[in-house]
């Protein structure tokens, strides 16, 4: 095997390891589908606490249906930044994710800290041209005792 073949093989192997169908050219992520957009965005913002991705991944006319946030990209960024500052150990682990056209749903487990029982939530994003442009959510506390033996996930 020559040196070019080895380098090509290693390069292809590394590209195959990129998460969620993302590819990176000049530091800008490109995604193969809307589900990958939402999953990357979710993990960067709510698990890595990197709100800078809001600047590049949320559309300029962001429409919000959650009663806790106003419309607009900056209002969303300010609200999320305030939440993450108040709860620096919070996580929102994705349990299920699916897509239907331009809509992506994320069923997730929100915890404010490691000891928190948490909440079950479903967030729905509408994606247009690779940007998040609209959001809905429903959130439910996880009870100490349930009427059945099933989990909320």
Image (cartoon, grey):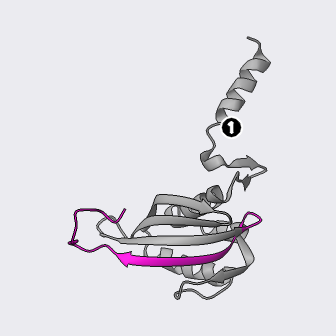
Residue at x 55%, y 66% (from the top left corner): 105
Q: Is residue 148 magenta?
A: yes
The quarter holding residue 52 reads bottom right
Q: 1 or 144: nearer the eye?
A: 144
Image side of residue 99 versus residue 143, left or right: right
Is residue 89 something that shows in the picture?
A: no
What are the residue bounds of the magenta stretch? Answer: 128-153
The x, y position of residue 99, in whole percent, is 60, 61
Nearest the viewer among 47 and 129 is 129
Q: Which residue is mark 1?
A: 15
The total of numbered circles placed on residues is 1
Q: Residue at x 38, y 77 (%)?
A: 140
Instruction: Tell me if residue 3 comes above or below residue 122 in the rendering.
Output: above
Q: Is residue 107 visible?
A: yes
Residue at image coords 60%, 69%: 51
Res 5 quadrant in image: top right
117 vs 134, left or right, is left
- State the SS at label 1: helix
Percent across and percent down for residue 19 are 60, 47
Q: Position of residue 61 (x, y in %)?
A: 74, 81
């Amino acid at each position: 095997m020559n040196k070019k073949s080895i380098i090509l093989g290693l390069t292809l192997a590394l590209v195959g390891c990129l998460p969620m169908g993302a590819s990176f050219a000049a530091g800008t992520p490109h995604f193969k589908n809307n589900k990958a957009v939402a999953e990357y965005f979710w993990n960067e913002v709510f698990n890595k606490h990197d709100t800078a991705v809001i600047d590049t991944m949320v559309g300029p006319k962001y429409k919000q249906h959650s009663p806790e946030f106003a419309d607009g990209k900056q209002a969303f960024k300010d609200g999320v930044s305030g939440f993450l500052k108040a709860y620096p150990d919070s996580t929102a682990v994705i349990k299920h994710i699916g897509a239907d056209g331009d809509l992506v749903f994320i069923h997730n487990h929100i915890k404010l800290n490691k000891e928190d029982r948490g909440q079950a939530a479903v967030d729905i994003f509408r994606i247009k041209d690779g940007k998040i442009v609209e959001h809905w959510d429903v959130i439910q506390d996880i009870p100490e005792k349930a009427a059945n033996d099933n989990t909320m996930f």
